[in-house]
Image (cartoon, rainbow, N blue to C red):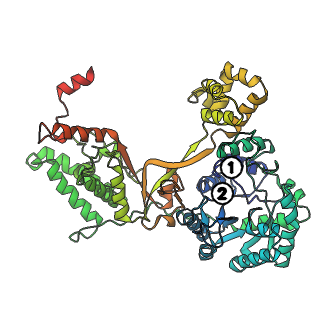
Amino acid sequence: MTEFVHLHNHTDYSLLDGAASISKYIAKAKEFGMKALAITDHGNMFGVLDFYDACLKADIQPIPGCEFYINPDGRASKEAGNHYYHLILLAMNDKGYHNLMELNSIAFTEGFYYKPRIDNEVLAEHSEGLICTCACLAGEIPQKLLDGNVEGAYEVARWYKNLFGDRYYIEIQNHFIPEEIQVLPQLVKLARDLDIKLIATNDIHYIDKEDANAHDILLCIGTGKKKSDEDRMRFQTQEFYMKSPDEMAELFSEYPDAISNTVELAQRCNFRIDFPGPKLPSVDVPEQYKDTKEFLTALSWDGLRKRYPGYENDPEKKKVLEDRLSYELGVILKMGFDGYYLIVRDYIHWAKTHNVPVGAGRGSGAGSMVAYCIEITNVDPIAHDLLFERFLNPERVSLPDFDVDFCYEGRQSVIDYVTEHYGVDRVGQIATFGTLKAKAVVKDVARVLDIPFDESNRITKNILDVLPDEAKAEHVTSLLEWSIRVSPELQEVRSRGGVYEELFDVSLRLENLSRHVSTHACGVVIGQTPLKDYVPLYKDPKSGGISTQYTMNNLERCGLVKMDFLGLKTLTLIKNTEKLIRKRIPDFDVENIPDGDKATFDMLSK
């Protein structure tokens, strides 16, 4: 089999455009015996780390990359006309990976106009460690050639070669589109004239040729069109699938170097990302204390006396309390989590002193006596016999995780305080992704196929809500597939053929692909230095909020500290109820209500 590496690939993180999951890419690459594979989603790096992990697990060399949108005249320009071209950037070492992230962050935070954009200026500043290719038909060079501006195309190519040297490649594609066939020999001539190497790519948007119709319908979902609409976005051919190395060699038989150069390029990108692990931001320590360890220790012992007034007079109680506090502090300080406790204490203290109600304590964190003494929690772990080890122990070396409830109305003000305190460039929220779940994908596809809404509703009522254990035992991961298997009603609909058979075929191919990006409900990250040093950033075009492009499970190893700020409407309700009660009982305080009040429990028991 021919040696070849696919270097221009769109996963489902090219939202509602890429119709292939990362796992399917990896499986196909293994089937082809490929030793390396790139990810180049449109304008984002959402899937890079999941792709990186999956490749390593499959013994395939991952090549992190992105298909950028670039406006050579300026990323902030909003003039009418063509606002961007396409450009492929691939990381060849750890420095290149960090430049890739920084450019992607700049594209969202400084250059967003219809698309996240960079420009020549920032590209020149962050070109180290990157390999660049001229991309698809939407690249600047192919566009100038199509416009008949040959000299302009050569000028652009010289600029890129001057910037990247031998790290710049001319990319050629052939999906049997007339414009591609027109510019292909021109691109080859330009590359030969300027001594720039060629690479062949296939701009993959789906895995198998049979997925072309599913991809077409995915485009309709993304653009709000129906399949029958004449005037809609569509791909001209069905050639955007993951072709085998032999297919690619045959397609570009006139240019064998464009095939072999993909392997050479991949070998230049053989590196491992350096993951630093969580790095705590610096904490303000009063001048009478030499460091955070001494400060946390002093706060804890002061808190012990406040929480358990007069405990020194009871020798047995004194031993229990002081032994527990000493033990916990020993573990916390040894594991280096003193700064973490102080950061959480700081924003909880701010909330309490700014009329933002805070929850008593949620989850295993309530088992920490240190947390109780420094008023992170308000539940006595000794009185309730709670275990500190459920929250933190030396056998499990990972950051502790306090889930903190705030009044729903006041939650944002606490996040604003943290942002102001640590720096607007060091605090952000976390991206999460909505997917095309079984029922949702059937409804979306039904709309595109012009199946009436009432009918699609009747169909989806037969789809299960969760995958049963017997399905998992048979290694079935598709809820829709299992639902069809066990539902005579769904089988009957499918057996009608025509548009109904197409409905199920397409829905099964699209199920569980990423649909949209949103913001995690409670997660907030804090960086020791600006966030873009650790992860690529995303800016919500509607709210303007900044979040990490990587999801929650990838952040700590990248160097960030995650905090959970939960908005709880119950606390807001209690706060408003207190205001009403104080009209009759001015000194009423919810903290002084006995937690064993019989009348209350009788009422709840009813």
Name which residue lies at 87% across and 63% down: 182
x then y, percent, for residue 464 = 59, 26
Is 114 or 286 nearer to us in this picture? 114
x then y, percent, for residue 305 = 14, 52
Is 399 or 19 nearer to us in this picture? 19
Query: Do the residues bearing badges 2 and 1 touch, measured as CB atoms within 8 Å?
Result: yes
Q: Amino acid at mark 1?
A: Asp
Task: Indicate which disc residue 42 carries.
Answer: 2
SS at mark 1 in the image: loop
Q: Amino acid at mark 2?
A: His
Q: Give neighbour class at mark 2: few <14, some 14-19, many 20+ (Cα, 10 Å).
A: many
**Label 1: which residue?**
17
Query: For residue 453, what is the image quadrant?
Result: top right
Sequence order check, earlier mark of 2 and 1: 1
Tell me, yes or no, if residue 155 can be seen here: yes
x then y, percent, for residue 368 = 29, 47
Is 578 or 5 nearer to us in this picture? 578
> Which image quadrant: the C terminus?
top left
x then y, percent, for residue 573 = 28, 38
Asked whether, in this view, residue 312 is left or right of residue 69, the answer is: left
Position of residue 235 relative to residue 580, above or below, is below
Asked whether, in this view, residue 336 is left or right of residue 21, the answer is: left
